[in-house]
Image (tube, rainbow, N blue to C red):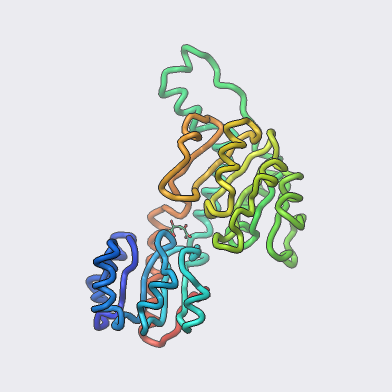
């Protein structure tokens, strides 16, 4: 489908998606620098009816205000915490995301990261590569995964898929969520501290944004305790990162597996030397198959909006 240049790309996107937007939709790209941006918006702002962005960048209230004819913000990714949904709603601007298509890969990553963190496979690999096995002998013993007690914060699509996988490992699952989930076969904890106090591993799968900022606080980390682990595949903002680093550096937490950070791509360097911490560069949905499905759903939302004004997967 082609349009008269009414589509605006905001922030970097998957190269094939950016190419399709430019070639087939005559999309323009919002300049990075603020000086160029102001001139661009003065010239083209009123033409824009649809923005395509990702969770990395998003659309804030200022940008929404500068686009008087905007009708939709189409987000590549399930998380849309970088877009000001309230400001969009106040203007009648729809927001879509890419749910479901990435659930399996993100849940796979959560389980892989959990296993790597408890069993220290990444650290063991480094041990072999550094030539330490013949010199220092067997790698130190690690923590069993199967039959552990796992608490999940956020029992949505992804949290439920993680719970389902870990059930097959014989893990006992409990969860905390804004609301208790009807018919969920897992024990509900009324608060994150209550949940953390009764588990060996706390997995964060809650949406980011102001509603969950710092939900995993210093008190929650203390409740997990020196024998417990944290795994985060959600958003860095859900965890008090300063408190987490301090707990890990001081041995008040047994370990952590982190795919997301407070200020990506910056990762606290204090963690680099810790073998009980696994650090991933926000790759949970990063497979060829899932990213292609996310791209296709992003374009379905754009096509639907341009043709009918309605989004396929509104948030
Ligand atoms: C993507 C994600 O890496 O979907 C999300 O919310 O965090 C990831 O799947 C990201 O959105 C791409 O920018």
Q: Position of residue 177 (x, y in %)?
A: 68, 60
Rendered position, 231 above or below 238: above
Q: Residue at x 28, y 75 (%)?
A: 41
Would residue 179 be found to the left or right of residue 58 on screen?
A: right
Would residue 259 be found to the left or right of residue 219 on screen?
A: left
Is residue 301 visible from the viewing direction of this image? no
Q: Quadrant of residue 62?
A: bottom left
Q: Quadrant of residue 33?
A: bottom left
Rendered position, 256 above or below 124: below
Q: How many numbered marks does the figure carry?
A: 0
Q: Position of residue 165 (x, y in %)?
A: 62, 51
Q: Position of residue 125 (x, y in %)?
A: 46, 28
Is residue 259 visible from the viewing direction of this image? yes
Q: Residue at x 61, y 57 (%)?
A: 159
Which residue sits furthest top? 135
Where's the N terminus, which quadrant?
bottom left
Q: State the residue in front, 57 or 27.
A: 57
Ligand 1 shows up in which quadrant of the image?
bottom left
Q: Position of residue 130 (x, y in %)?
A: 41, 21
Q: Residue at x 59, y 35 (%)?
A: 248
Q: State the residue in front, 168 or 60.
A: 60
Q: State the residue in front, 275 or 142.
A: 275
Rendered position, 252 above or below 9: above
Q: State the residue in front, 10 or 39.
A: 39
Would residue 64 be found to the left or right of residue 245 on screen?
A: left
Q: Residue at x 27, y 82 (%)?
A: 3
């Amino acid at each position: 489908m082609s349009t008269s240049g009414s589509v605006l790309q905001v922030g970097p996107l998957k190269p094939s998606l950016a190419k399709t937007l430019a070639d087939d939709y005559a999309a323009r790209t919002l300049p990075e620098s603020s000086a160029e941006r102001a001139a661009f918006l003065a010239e083209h702002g009123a033409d824009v009816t649809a923005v395509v962005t990702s969770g990395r960048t998003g659309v804030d209230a200022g940008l929404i205000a500068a686009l008087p004819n905007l009708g939709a913000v189409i987000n590549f990714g399930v998380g849309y915490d970088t877009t000001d949904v309230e400001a969009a709603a106040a203007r009648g601007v729809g927001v879509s995301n890419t749910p479901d298509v990435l659930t399996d890969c993100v849940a796979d990553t959560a389980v892989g990261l959990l296993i790597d963190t408890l069993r220290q496979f990444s650290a063991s690999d480094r041990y072999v590569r550094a030539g330490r096995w013949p010199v220092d002998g067997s790698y130190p013993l690690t923590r069993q995964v199967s039959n552990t007690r796992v608490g999940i914060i956020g029992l949505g699509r992804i949290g439920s898929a993680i719970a389902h996988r870990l059930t097959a490992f014989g893990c006992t699952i409990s969860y905390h969520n804004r609301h208790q989930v009807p018919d969920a076969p897992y024990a509900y904890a009324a608060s994150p501290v209550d949940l953390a106090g009764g588990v060996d591993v706390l997995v964060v799968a809650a949406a980011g944004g102001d509603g969950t900022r710092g939900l995993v606080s210093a008190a929650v980390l203390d409740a997990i305790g020196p024998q417990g682990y944290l795994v985060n595949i959600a958003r860095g903002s859900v965890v008090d990162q300063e408190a987490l680093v301090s707990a890990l550096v001081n041995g008040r937490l047994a370990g952590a597996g982190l795919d997301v950070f407070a200020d990506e791509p910056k990762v606290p360097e204090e963690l680099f030397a810790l073998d009980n911490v696994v650090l991933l560069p926000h790759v949970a949905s990063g497979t060829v198959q899932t990213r292609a499905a996310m791209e296709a759903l992003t374009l379905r939302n754009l096509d639907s909006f341009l043709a009918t004004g309605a989004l396929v997967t509104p948030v």
